[in-house]
Amino acid sequence: MENTDKSIATNYFRLSNEGIHLLRNKFEYKFISYDQIKMYEIKRGKVAKNWLVILILGIAFIIGAYYFGEGIILSFLYDSNPLYIEAIIAPTIFLIIGIYMLYMSLKKELLLYFKTAAKSYKFSVRQIKQENRLGDLNQLLNMKVR
């Protein structure tokens, strides 16, 4: 397998003259030749695979934090019982997790989609865009994919 200096690589895939090398921990675990690729597309899309599930869980965490926090505030205002630090930390953690889940579910990025006869793949091209090699990626795929 020839690895030239012109190969385009990220942490998840590497494009060479032979095809696309799928990487895991910088080691190749699967090779897909350009002949196997039916179509490819570079477009903005959601990064998370199950973004709707993450969105619903994030909203649930935020609603839970609201009701939990509301109960604490009401007990602080109208009861003379001591307020424990755990009662303040728990809704705050719920709120932070909920906001993070909302952010991750709605996050969009430039992605490379390609389909083979058996499976479709989706990879982020953020690293390639930062290196200003998006034109090289598109040119290589245009030449190799029929």
Image (tube, rainbow, N blue to C red):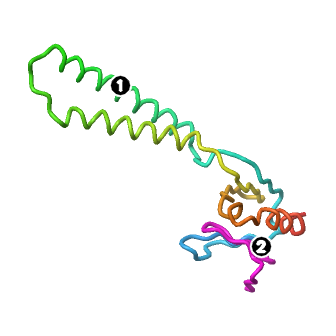
| Up-down relation of residue 50 to residue 65 (above or below) | below
Q: Quadrant of the C terminus?
A: bottom right
Q: Amino acid at mark 1?
A: Tyr
- Give the image location of residue 78, x and y in percent: 16, 13
Q: Nearer the viewer, residue 146 or 3?
A: 3
Q: Nearer the viewer, residue 79 or 63?
A: 79
Kindly identify the residue that appears in the image at 73 percent across and 85 percent down.
1
Q: In this figure, which residue is indicated by the disc labeled 2?
A: 19
In the rendered image, the residue lying farthest to the top is 78
Q: Residues within 10 Å of mark 1 (few under 14, many from 20)?
A: some
Q: Main secondary structure of the magenta part?
A: loop
Q: Where are the magenta residues, as a range?
A: 1-18
Can you tell which quarter of the image residue 16 is in?
A: bottom right
Q: In this figure, which residue is indicated by the disc labeled 1?
A: 66
- Give the image location of residue 61, x and y in percent: 39, 33
Q: Secondary structure at mark 2?
A: strand
Kindly identify the residue that appears in the image at 9 percent across and 18 percent down.
80
The stretch drawn in magenta includes residue 87: no
- Give the image location of residue 132, x and y in percent: 74, 64
Kindly identify the residue that appears in the image at 9 percent across and 22 percent down.
81
Q: Amino acid at mark 2?
A: Gly
Kindly identify the residue that appears in the image at 25 percent across and 20 percent down.
71
Q: CA distance from mark 1 to mark 2?
A: 51 Å
